Image: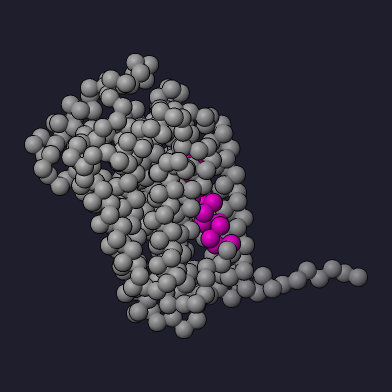
Amino acid sequence: MGPAGLDVSRRLLVEPTHGVLTGPAPSAVPPSTGLDPAEPLRLARRRAGSGRRSLNPYVEIARPDHWFKNVFLAPGFVAAAALVPGVDLGLSVSRFLVCIAVACIISSANYTLNEWLDAPHDRFHPTKRTRPAPSGRVRARWVWLQYAFLSFTGLALASTLGLRFMATSATLWIMGIVYNVPPIRSKDRVFIDVLSESFNNPLRLTMGWFSVPTALIPPSSLLVGYWMAGAFLMGMKRYAELRTLQNGQAAGLYRRSLGTYTPEVLLVSSFFYSLLSSMLLGVFLIKHRIELLLSVPLLAGLFTWYLGMAFKEESPVQNPERLVREPAFALYCAVTAAVTLLLMLVDVPPLRTLLEMSLQLPR
């Protein structure tokens, strides 16, 4: 990040508690970006009305509409419940419900931090500039108080599920700092932005796994394969964002890494991530659950469908919370999840026989 950007972020971190968001003035938006500098404030006033005293903007920056991403906890829970012998299912389910609550609370803490520190950059995005922080609808003192409250509550609740679960949850919280806070601010670094954000995928899987009382840890092939699957999704999100912004200057002002990426680089890197994910998940299923081989065509279709959606105008891929509004895709995801769950629970002996067969060559 350049000196100017670093200075802005520092001012955001130490901003006086009595003021609303400060930072680059709306007039600083270059004319070449094609954005009307005054429009975000006008729209914010229309949306907020007299709502500066309302809690709604603070709920909005916690992004409860993004909680659905914690569905990535489920594969970890299901895998542990299916693979770990002697699991107390009733206890595991109750712990998993606490796990979901922890993930939602810590995610909201990270989103609160992200919203505040991203505000100077979000002003250069055609839709994100109307969010509460860049449009001036939240105050510093309440944002930081909300962040502290959510962080403490999430980590305190995580401590009730044991040391390993607590450590994994704390890592998820720390990744929010790594991703957003200078001088690291990994979201501004090419390739690292994709890999650091998608690292939350294996963390969520591990949280789901440790919600089942077990001394075992998730297989590395599953963890890294899950990570690379997340990197594919994140790479496609960056690609969709770059296509939407189009203007290279506007893209770089909104997200520094987007000023360096090209569509070709994002597509090729996402293809690389998908190949790695496929191979590593293949290692996992052959070694631990051969029945999952039957779900591979569905999973391949899921990757392909997601890739196709990234080419749409105003693609929902750039805003994952909008994916639930794609009924056909949502149905396909549900069917894939149901089939995968069934294959985790039901044995298919012929597949195991096939795996154990050796090729007999004539002498």
Q: Is residue 165 above or below residue 224?
A: below
- Left/right of residue 329 with respect to residue 216 in the rendered view: left
**Residue 237 visible somewhere in the drawing:** yes
> Residue at image x 55%, y 56%?
225
Q: x and y percent of residue 199 in the render?
A: 48, 53
> Residue at image x 35%, y 70%?
159
Q: x and y percent of residue 331 in the render?
A: 37, 53
- Left/right of residue 107 with respect to residue 197 in the rendered view: left
> Residue at image x 32%, y 41%?
13
Q: Is residue 254 above or below residue 274?
A: above
What quarter of the picture does the C terminus occupy? bottom right
223 or 158: nearer the viewer: 158
**Residue 304 visible somewhere in the drawing:** no
Q: Residue furthest bottom?
A: 86
61 or 358: nearer the viewer: 61
265 or 155: nearer the viewer: 155
How many numbered circles are shown?
Answer: 0
Q: Residue furthest left?
A: 50
> Residue at image x 55%, y 73%?
348
Q: x and y percent of residue 187 in the render?
A: 45, 41
Residue segment shown in magenta = 221-236
Colour mapping:
one colour
Name which quarter of the figure residue 323 lies in. Answer: top left
Q: Is residue 245 above or below residue 53?
A: above
Q: Residue furthest top?
A: 31
Instruction: Kindly report the secondary structure that dominates the magenta region of the rendered protein.
Output: helix
111 or 245: nearer the viewer: 111
Q: x and y percent of residue 125 in the render?
A: 34, 30
In magenta stretch: residue 103: no
Q: Residue furthest right?
A: 363
